Amino acid sequence: MKEYILITGASSGIGYEMAKQLASKNFNLLLVARSEDKLLKLQQELKNKFKIELEYLLYDLSEPNAAQDLYNEIKEHKYLVTGLINNAGFGDYGNFVEMPLKKDEEMIAVNVTTLVGLTKLFGADMVKAGKGRIMNVASLLSFLPFPYYSIYSATKSFVLSFTETVSAELEGTGVIVTALCPGTVETPFHTDAMRKTNAMSANKPVPADVVAEAGVELFLNGKGKKIVGFMNWFLSNLPRVTPDKLMMKIKKNLASAKE
């Protein structure tokens, strides 16, 4: 049976770039996103160029039971998933009490609920098989929660904590669970409001293919967590040496719009 790597959020940004890089290394891929046009184009491009098996599935991962439904469909097609990259996720920027509740709930569903479900379902299969790799995409904000990104920061803090604990539980099973922690990345993720903040002026976005390269290396060969870029590593460690009150004041300033 042919083995596949499953990538969620594969139609753009980091997921798109990781798909291209893994295809170039001759891995068969299962890609998940909502945009059929983008997935179909990517499928045709990569299959023609690299002669791999590549299938795609259309899913809105914010929907109830998305993880179980996706898992069931993959099992029905008899695709053998030996690698999982939980890349799908989205964020928003603004004052918490003014943001739509529905969008908050959808963010939690994609960034947390579906990620947990896919990790559990495919992780259990991998444990039975005695091998497999799972990588969850966290964030610099996992270490450095920012005001005006309240739900996003909280979900990414969850992803890192969840990944580290599950990784410890699965030690010795043959299943490796890792966390990729990028900072600001040049992707469609960023709204105009985000781009006008002090933080994005001070810490320029990294190209998605550069982050994807670090992610592919971690996924295939690494362990633990990886923060992409020295500046992001430095920022992630600031809370260790900075008083909480001062740290939050700094973060609020960075997250605010440029004057």
Image (tube, helix red, strand yellow):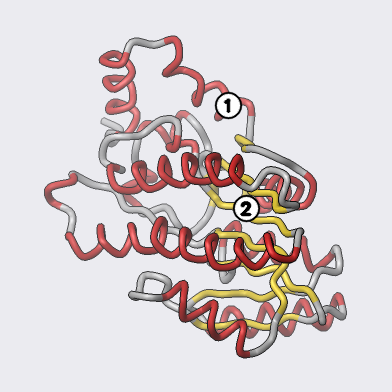
Label 1 environment density (alpha carbons within 10 Å; few <14, some 14–19, many ≥20): some
Residue 81 lies, in percent from the top left, at 69, 71
**Residue occupied by mark 1:** 233
Q: Name which residue lies at 28% across and 36% down.
A: 257
Q: Name which residue lies at 51% across and 20% down.
A: 237
Pick whichever, 6 or 232, lies toward us: 6
Residue 169 lies, in percent from the top left, at 59, 44
Point out the tag, 1 or 2, that comes first from the N-terminus: 2
Which element is circle 2 on? Answer: strand
Residue 83 lies, in percent from the top left, at 70, 63
Pick whichever, 239 or 195, lies toward us: 239
Q: Amino acid at mark 2?
A: Met
| Left or right: 188 as drawn, with respect to 128 | left
**Residue occupied by mark 2:** 135
**Picture layout, residue 171 above or below residue 54:** above
Q: Is residue 179 visible?
A: no
**Picture layout, residue 220 above or below residue 256:** below
Which element is circle 1 on? Answer: helix
Residue 67 lies, in percent from the top left, at 46, 72
Q: Residue furthest bottom?
A: 76
Q: Name which residue lies at 69% across and 86% down.
A: 78
**Picture layout, residue 157 above or below residue 105:** above
